[in-house]
Image (spheres, helix red, strand yellow):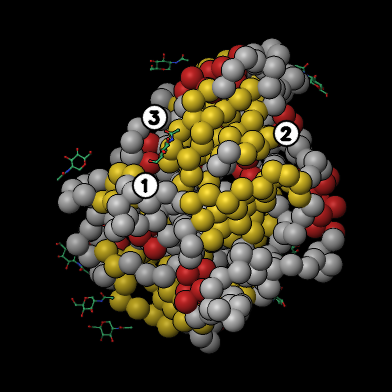
Amino acid sequence: MNFLSTISVLSLLGAANAAGLENPRVLIPHTPLPPAEFSVPITGKVPRRKSKSNALARRGHLGGADYTSIIDGTLGDKEFVTNATIGGQNFSLIVDTGSSDTWVVQRGFQCLSADGTHVPESACGFGSSGFDVNASTTFQPSNLSFLETYGNGWSVAGPVGYDTVTVGGMSVEHQLVPVPNAAYYTGDGVNSGILGLAFPPLTSVFNTTDPANATSETQVFYNPFFFTAVEEKKVKYPENDKFDANLGFLSFGGIAPVPVVEPRVTVTIQGYSTNSTGFITPSDSPDARYFWYTVDVANYEITGTAGLFAGSNNSILDSGAALNNVPPDVAAAFAAAFNPPAVLTNITAGLELYIVDCNATAPEFLVYIGGKTFSIDPQDQIVPVGPDAQGNEVCVSGTQGGTLTNNPNGILLLGDVFFHNVVITFNPIDGEVTITQRAEY
Ligand SMILES: *[C@@H]1O[C@H](CO)[C@@H](O)[C@H](O)[C@H]1NC(C)=O
Ligand SMILES: *[C@@H]1O[C@H](CO)[C@@H](O)[C@H](O)[C@H]1NC(C)=O
Ligand SMILES: *[C@@H]1O[C@H](CO)[C@@H](O)[C@H](O)[C@H]1NC(C)=O
Ligand SMILES: *[C@@H]1O[C@H](CO)[C@@H](O)[C@H](O)[C@H]1NC(C)=O
Ligand SMILES: *[C@@H]1O[C@H](CO)[C@@H](O)[C@H](O)[C@H]1NC(C)=O
Ligand SMILES: *[C@@H]1O[C@H](CO)[C@@H](O)[C@H](O)[C@H]1NC(C)=O
Ligand SMILES: *[C@@H]1O[C@H](CO)[C@@H](O)[C@H](O)[C@H]1NC(C)=O
Ligand SMILES: *[C@@H]1O[C@H](CO)[C@@H](O)[C@H](O)[C@H]1NC(C)=O
Ligand SMILES: *[C@@H]1O[C@H](CO)[C@@H](O)[C@H](O)[C@H]1NC(C)=O
Ligand SMILES: *[C@@H]1O[C@H](CO)[C@@H](O)[C@H](O)[C@H]1NC(C)=O
């Protein structure tokens, strides 16, 4: 794992081009990534790792939801992963609330570099040799194909089948599962694919056997894993056939149940409309659809500095992104509040990030949602990304500047830095999320 590929996990925001998009879909990003500047293994400095292993040790003593899948961290807790079984084979998958396809790489896949040349399988860094379709007795092929390019440049493509998917003891049979056989990917040596938990309009499957022929005309939408589970009533329904928010939802933010404190708030997810050229804009209209788990952040506050910063609509709750992306003025003020301050630096051409001394004192960051204030522990705000060429540890601010635009592809988001501090319950049925502050750990 090198510095650049670590950075590439910073925004695994899926399907930036979903649903009808003017951009042609391509397997290989047009702009090859520049060579990595720093290239040495990540060291063992992992914030809050101890609490997490304590929590993992408590597994088996968990109550609460019907199905509880333990979430673990990789890449120094910059990524959430969980175990899943597909067609009887076990894999670790990235838990991504920012994309919708649940896929596992296929055994014998071709690993590609950014410029599309074939490289050894190991360069993709998957955690296994992949899903063996022949070894699954339940796998059924289709004439569909999968093509997905993630916000960080990762790209995967290949066939689509149907098989039994199990996560946290919850099984869905005949779930559509892409099994890509080509990948441009910089994995963590742990995961073999992604568990996509966002909404159906962000799925990336096409009615063509050749993913190179994928177009908005051939795109077909399907129910992602959790949506199929809900439709098949795999999660319990109370008598009135209405969802009980205490039952059955997958909960993220660490281990569920985990000790929580005030505040707690339930807010509606923001909907979007797609105009005829495929441009996605926020919408309050009755025919608006859900794409991401997107909420209205009213304000941000930096403890110890005066006043509140204006918030932003369309902030995506994205467990597949390591860092927060907030309006640029907020990120700049936050950077200035570190001691010593974080400094905006071009990490590589075109990639500006606030770099901070790994031993700096970080400020507390408060996020106002639905009239409640959620706090991010300062120790989550100094994120190690690996040593530089001289062997010195490099750290970035956990809260970076995003792009302000009406289009959520823009992208403002609350990533793993936020998720470490809260328990978020996603309720795609009622179009709501419940956010609860975690007890200090
Ligand atoms: C996932 O499965 C592996 C292998 O069975 C196990 O070692 C690991 O602890 C599991 N991880 C979680 C988070 O349950
Ligand atoms: C896969 O995981 C399940 C559930 O944790 C376990 O029961 C099973 O033994 C595992 N299978 C293999 C082949 O490791
Ligand atoms: C699965 O079977 C097909 C057809 O026999 C073969 O081409 C392919 O290599 C097999 N895949 C694996 C992973 O063994
Ligand atoms: C795929 O298409 C071919 C040719 O039309 C057809 O023979 C085959 O049954 C289809 N396979 C599936 C799984 O639908
Ligand atoms: C795919 O296209 C074929 C032929 O155009 C059509 O018969 C089939 O229903 C389509 N499948 C899906 C899932 O849309
Ligand atoms: C893909 O598109 C090319 C060019 O339009 C066409 O020749 C080919 O038959 C298509 N392949 C499939 C599998 O649809
Ligand atoms: C769709 O929305 C975009 C962004 O607002 C706009 O540029 C484009 O002209 C719109 N297309 C149509 C057909 O209205
Ligand atoms: C977000 O949108 C809602 C409804 O459209 C509006 O009431 C609210 O003021 C907006 N919030 C921000 C921070 O712009
Ligand atoms: C990063 O590079 C761009 C393009 O060369 C430049 O416009 C920008 O000012 C640089 N940013 C910093 C913080 O140096
Ligand atoms: C930061 O602290 C570590 C030990 O906590 C130390 O080894 C390292 O030299 C310090 N770095 C700087 C730049 O002071």
Q: Are marks 2 and 1 in contact (CB under 8 Å)?
A: no
Q: Residues within 10 Å of mark 3 (few under 14, many from 20)?
A: some
Q: Do we see residue 269 in this rendering?
A: yes
Q: CA distance from mark 2 to mark 1?
A: 30 Å
Which residue lies at the image location 26% right of the left edge and 51% below the top edge? 274
Residue placed furthest toward the bottom: 137
Q: Amino acid at mark 2?
A: Asp
Q: Looking at this view, is 421 or 213 the one in front?
A: 421
The residue that label 3 is drawn on is 404
The residue that label 1 is drawn on is 16
Q: CA distance from mark 2 to mark 3?
A: 25 Å
Q: Are marks 1 and 3 in contact (CB under 8 Å)?
A: no
The residue that label 2 is drawn on is 377
Query: In x, y percent, where is residue 284?
Result: 34, 49
Which residue lies at the image location 39% right of the left edge and 80% below the top edge? 141
Q: Quadrant of ligand 10?
A: top right
Q: Secondary structure at mark 2?
A: loop
Q: Secondary structure at mark 3?
A: loop
Q: CA distance from mark 1 to mark 3?
A: 15 Å
